[in-house]
Structure formats: structure tokens, C-alpha cells
Image (tube, rainbow, N blue to C red):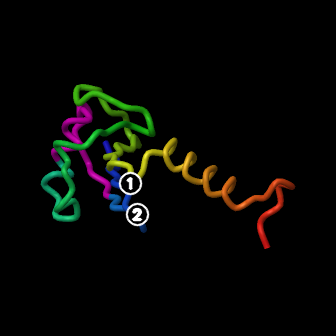
Amino acid sequence: MRIEVVYALAHGAIQRSYDLPAAATVGDALQAARADPAFAGVDVDGSPFGVFGARARRELPLRPGDRVEIYRALALDPKAARRTRVKRARAGKGASGVGKP
């Protein structure tokens, strides 16, 4: 069966297709990616992963066409980024709520 393994980068992605046996698991797909030079430098063993956006276990059986995703750490916590944006927006407004000239 054919599956895809994807690793998102800041500007693009590494995306490869593999033909695996019918009884393949997520772990088998990760092993195929680990052996692929395209994934050199990616911490395949230490990174979280999932299938189509949902976290998964290595033992999860795959189905034809599944996309195994290797996740990377966020550069900034989304909640912290939002707090920073709100602080900047509030600091730039006067009493009328309109930005300073």
C-alpha cells in the first residue's frame, strides 16, 4: 500500500511516498522515513507524530493513502503570541481607541 510521510518546515515541507506491506503501522512508516536521506536532520524518533492531523501511536495500522505527519516544535506558543499582539495593540491606542498619530 502507498502512504505519505510529511514533515513541515517554516518555508515548505518534506513529503515522500512509500510502498509498505498491507499490515504496515505508523512505526513502519517512520522507519522508512528515518532511512530516507530526504529526512536527514529530522529527529524522527524524538518528534511527535500523527496521521492526518490526529496524534497516533506507533502501533496504529495504516490504510492505503494515509498521511503520516512528523511534527516539529512551535517557534512560539500561540497563546503567548496573542498576548504580545494584544499588548502592542493596546499600547498604540489612545483614550479614543484610535492609534496615535
Point out the residue furthest to the left here.
35
Instruction: Name above or below for residue 1 compared with residue 10.
Output: above
Residue 25 highlighted magenta (yes or no): yes
> Disc 2 marks which residue?
10
Q: Amino acid at mark 1?
A: Ala
In the drawing, does residue 90 fall left or right of residue 72? right
Q: Residues within 10 Å of mark 2 (few under 14, many from 20)?
A: few
| Stretch in magenta | 16-31
Q: Which residue is painted at 17% across and 62% down in the image?
A: 40
Label disc, if present, on residue 84 of the rendered structure: none
In the structure shown, which secondary structural element does the residue marked by tag 2 occupy? loop
Point out the residue furthest to the right here.
96
In depth, the one of 17 and 31 nearer the eye is 31
- Find residue 82 and report its horizontal and vertical position in percent: 57, 47
Quadrant position of residue 35: bottom left
- Find residue 36 and report its horizontal and vertical position in percent: 17, 59
In the drawing, does residue 34 fall left or right of residue 60? left
- Find residue 27 and report its horizontal and vertical position in percent: 20, 36
Cα separation between marks 2 and 1: 10 Å
In the drawing, does residue 22 fall left or right of residue 79? left
In depth, the one of 45 and 74 nearer the eye is 74
> Disc 1 marks which residue?
75
Look at the image and tell me in which quarter the C terminus lies: bottom right
Q: Are marks 2 and 1 in contact (CB under 8 Å)?
A: yes
Q: Which residue is painted at 34% across and 46% down in the image?
A: 71
In the structure shown, which secondary structural element does the residue marked by tag 1 occupy? loop
